Amino acid sequence: MSPKLSVRHVFKIFGAGADEALARLRQGKGKEEILLETGATVGVQDTSFDVSEGEIFVVMGLSGSGKSTLVRMLNGLVPPTSGEICIDGEDVASCGPDRLQAIRREKIAMVFQHFALFPHWTITENVAYGLKIKGMPAAERRATALQTLEQVGLGAWADALPPQLSGGMQQRVGLARALATGPQILLMDEPFGALDPLIRREMQEELVVLQKTLKKTIIFITHDLNEALLLGDRIAIMRDGRFVQVGAPQEIVANPADDYVAAFVGDIDRGRVFRATDIARPSETLHLEDNCQRALDRMQQLGRNALYVLAADRIAGIVRYEDLVRDGGAPRDLLRPFSSTVPEAKLHELYAHAARGLPIAVLDDGGTLTGVVELDDLFACLAGGPMPTHRQKREHLDA
């Protein structure tokens, strides 16, 4: 499937000496050196990436890294010095002003950090603004605005004025205004940056919930790594106008590309990044009919101190090596209660299960055992150790 958004070798240089600066960049000279020699400022340099339909792609970096310049190039607010920016295969960097305006109205909406609401308009009127620009009749745009306000939990505030709303509620209005026009792509430039930490967290979680229904293509700009890790299907770390690493949150935390990325992820709560599926071992099991010696031999062969016991394709319980040695009975007579989770559960959700001291079953939607989280693997991952070797081997085989 073709990407929804495709960016190829995009450069943005500010200043009168842009052409000369671009030539020097391509010769390998650095951003500061070019500024001294030409007076031109390198905003973005040689950036390429694809974003799939329905994906949240987060661009993360410190102030001055080029992330806001990049997102403004995506909808033509800032023209690139060089390169292609294609939406559904159409290059917005080279199309004329009329076509660019049509693409913005039909496919793209932007949400900024500052709400930019009209203070004397009602919330409904603010949300309907983009629909008014598109020429939608008054009754229809009000109905659409009200429906969108319900989506973001503000239906009861439809006829209020912006000053009557809290900062978090006003940002919901900004989001609703963007969603009301039915965009295919949402560009979100530090949208929660001006909010208090607790409200910011609520907005992040609400966006995650909304996205499950909306399935929009979202390019989200932030300087907050925790926000990036929570929201992003993939994350691009940006420095000095270029991407230094692009990958899934778990990949970036587990395998930072360089010291710069490693410094970002060093203090991250890994329990809120990694999932059960990231560390789960293959679901080696016993059968309810197995005898004691068969169970002991299998545990020794696998190097496990406990295994799940299946009755047909369902878990009957879990049996421990030490119980088998001490009692000498069949596994079916020594079954213990077990804990289970889902593949996408974050590791911090497994803390209570780990208190049992037994491996945690990973079950799919149908209740079938798909893997097992061993406690040693759980604690090693949380402590910052490398990904388990069994996981690496499995990814290699899958590839």
Image (cartoon, rainbow, N blue to C red):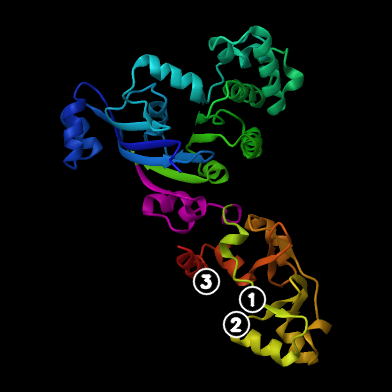
Mark 3, residue position: 390
Q: Residues within 10 Å of mark 3 (few under 14, many from 20)?
A: few
Q: Is residue 16 visible?
A: yes
| Dot 1 and dot 2 residues touching (CB under 8 Å) | yes
Q: Is residue 246 magenta?
A: yes
Looking at the picture, which amino acid does disc 3 mark? His
Mark 1, residue position: 284
Looking at the picture, which amino acid does disc 2 mark? Leu
Q: Is residue 220 magenta?
A: no
| Dot 2 and dot 3 residues touching (CB under 8 Å) | no
What is the spatial separation of the Cα atoms under label 1 and label 2, in whole angstroms?
A: 8 Å
Looking at the picture, which amino acid does disc 1 mark? Glu
Q: Which residues are magenta?
A: 243-272
Mark 2, residue position: 302
- Residue 337 shows which numbered tag? none
User: What residue is at 37 percent from the left and 33 percent from the top?
Assistant: 64
Q: Residue 171: x percent and y percent?
A: 61, 25
In the displayed structure, does residue 261 sit left or right of residue 172?
Answer: left
Q: Residues within 10 Å of mark 1 (few under 14, many from 20)?
A: some
SS at badge 2 = helix
Q: Is residue 108 visible?
A: no
